[in-house]
Image (spheres, rainbow, N blue to C red):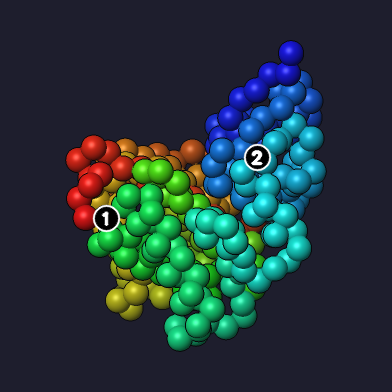
Amino acid sequence: MTSLCSFDFSVLDDLAFAAIRKKVSGLAPDQMVAQELGPVIELGQLSASGLLPSPDQATWLKLDSLGALYNALLRNQSQWLCPKTRRIGFFRAGRTLSSSDTVWTGFGLAIQQGAVASSIPKKIASQLTAAVWELYSNLYEHSGASETGLIVFRAGPNRFEFVVADKGIGVLKSLNSCAEYAALEDHGEALRLTLTDGISRHGTGASRGYGFRPLFIGLANLNGSLRFRSGNHALVIDGQNPSLMTARIAEKVPITGFLVSVVCELDNRTNGTR
């Protein structure tokens, strides 16, 4: 009988560490099913180094409902929305940012409508869309490779998830470009500092580095699961009203660039509050 389990971040981390030890074949089940966006996109990031196969090449991974999205990614489309539901899609960043970009405006509207369709209150859906925009604009300011940026979302019943990822310089190197953080060497601490208000590669006196505040505001009254990845660390926050105060930082297999994965789920208190 073929074993079956969900492909989540825990499994991905185990596979990545096992790959370093050359024990992937003994660890992977016969087949796993992709049920969340984040692990699939992060697997794609890790596959760039050849450590693990890409999601479409992993014989043990069934993409299931994510198959159409990943096929569109493989075709190098600049953007894609499910033609039937418009509740799942992606947008590729370019070399320059324009806040009046009509293509992004349309995609941002699809994100907001998807969040509302997930029963997220309209005000919170608007805040989450603003948070995605901030993460998107950060690609141009901090990654050094905005053209590698990718924004993906999916909306389902009482559940909304999105991923923003790039293959740029990562948060540690970005902070190192500021004299104030030139001596910083730890990727985990770099992640923590990056999420702290007022801290960025421009220095603490520049009144910059507040891009993650809309994200935490948008997640108020929601059950959120957040994973931030850069270098050889991950910073994870989850629970009701997630905040940096409850962050857990752990060492992981090195990854290129920066990845943010967010899952929002409604509890009974939020559901129905329009």
Which residue is disc 2 drawn over?
64
Q: What residue sits 30% from the left and 76% below the top? A: 207
* CA gap, disc 2 and disc 1: 28 Å
Image quarter (top left, top right, bottom left or bottom right) of the C terminus? bottom left
Residue type, label 1: Pro
Q: What residue sits 67% from the left and 41% below the top? A: 63
- Furthest toward the top, the residue is 1
* Disc assigned to residue 46: none
Name the spot of residue 148 as percent of width and height, x first: 65, 67
- Furthest toward the front, the residue is 84
Name the spot of residue 266 as percent of width and height, x first: 31, 42
Mark 1 falls on what kind of element? Answer: loop
- Using the rendered view, name the quadrant where residue 116 is placed: bottom left
Describe residue 5's horizontal placement relative to residue 53 as left or right. left
Q: What residue sits 46% from the left and 51% below the top? A: 155
- Using the rendered view, name the quadrant where residue 93 is placed: bottom right
